[in-house]
Image (spheres, rainbow, N blue to C red):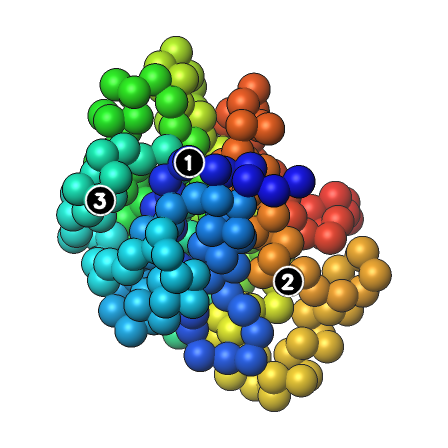
């Protein structure tokens, strides 16, 4: 099947590729949407990373360097200036912090910084996008949350920020359902991305290869991490008309990790 997003416009926030030898979720989502016919605004706080992904897509893609915490209205205004509409919004934003940790160790600065980006930034972009979506009577918002929002105990700032994003997803879905706007979230588990592996390897005192092996061993499905394309395919489903009766869903993409009890 091709053309599943033909004629649609999409804003992918966090589309830039972090350095590393694997693909990041944002880049994978932007590329997948473009493959299915969408025009894509690639947003990242790093202009070179945003430009690189837009150039990789080519025709129909545009780049914007913006900070979602302080420039949310600019992001949505750029999409409207370009296309006069916005059909899809993907909030693929998530940072960690070296001073995050269990509840008894996480410091205030870490908590506030992580929460500001992971939750407040996403909330502001959604708030900026909703008026036009509601007026048009259509729109799909996809938030990239995390399995850590429902499990874990070692990154309290990250976990709480993503749990808040889950609640925002459901509240947005219910608040705009009557206007035809849908909102869902994806909860990735252990995905082999530069941030997921490289960002945690130094924290855990392991090499990249050791970290990959340790993470893969925790996944029930084939004992292997997921790939960014797995997240992108889930986002494609939630963004497309195939999920037109799906809203308020928190969709795990985690190889069965979340199904484990005990």
Which residue appears at 73% of the width and 77% of the height?
A: 213
Where does the image place residue 4, in percent across and percent down from the top left?
A: 55, 37
Task: Report the disc number at residue 119.
Answer: none
Mark 2 neighbour density, 10 Å: few (under 14) some (14–19) many (20 or more): some
- Which quadrant is home to the N terminus? top right
* Location of residue 192 (image quadrant): bottom right
Does the image show residue 138?
Answer: yes
Nearer to us: label 1 or label 2? 1
Left or right side of 165 for 229: right
Where does the image place residue 8, in percent across and percent down from the top left?
A: 41, 36
Which residue appears at 61% of the width and 48% of the height?
A: 233
Q: Which residue is mark 2?
A: 227
Nearer to us: label 2 or label 3? 3
Mark 3 neighbour density, 10 Å: few (under 14) some (14–19) many (20 or more): few
Left or right side of 72 for 136: right
Judging from the image, what secondary structure is the residue with disc 3 in? Answer: helix
Q: Which residue is mark 1?
A: 7
Mark 1 neighbour density, 10 Å: few (under 14) some (14–19) many (20 or more): few
Left or right side of 40 for 102: right
The single residue placed furthest to the right in the displayed view is 222
């Amino acid at each position: 099947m091709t053309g599943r997003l033909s004629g649609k416009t999409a804003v992918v926030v966090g589309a830039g590729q972090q350095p590393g030898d694997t693909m990041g979720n944002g880049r994978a989502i932007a590329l997948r949407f473009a493959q299915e016919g969408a025009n894509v605004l690639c947003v990242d706080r790093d202009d070179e990373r945003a430009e690189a992904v837009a150039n990789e897509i080519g025709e129909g893609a545009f780049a914007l360097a913006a900070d979602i915490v302080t420039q949310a209205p600019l992001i949505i205004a750029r999409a409207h200036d370009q296309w006069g509409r916005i059909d899809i919004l993907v909030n693929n934003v998530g940072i960690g912090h070296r001073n995050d940790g269990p509840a008894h160790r996480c410091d205030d600065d870490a908590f506030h910084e992580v929460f500001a980006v992971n939750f407040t930034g996403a909330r502001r972009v959604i708030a900026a996008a909703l008026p036009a979506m509601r007026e048009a009577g259509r729109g799909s918002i996809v938030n990239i949350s995390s399995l850590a929002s429902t499990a874990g105990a070692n990154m309290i700032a990250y976990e709480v920020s993503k749990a808040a994003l889950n609640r925002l997803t459901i509240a947005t879905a219910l608040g705009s359902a009557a206007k035809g706007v849908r909102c869902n979230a994806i909860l990735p588990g252990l995905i082999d991305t530069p941030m997921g592996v490289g960002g945690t390897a130094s924290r855990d005192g392991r090499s990249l290869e050791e970290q990959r092996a340790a993470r893969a061993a925790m996944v029930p499905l084939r004992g292997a991490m997921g790939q960014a394309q797995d997240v992108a395919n889930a986002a494609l489903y939630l963004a497309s008309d195939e999920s037109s009766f799906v809203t308020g869903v928190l969709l795990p993409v985690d190889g069965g990790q979340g199904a484990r009890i005990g």
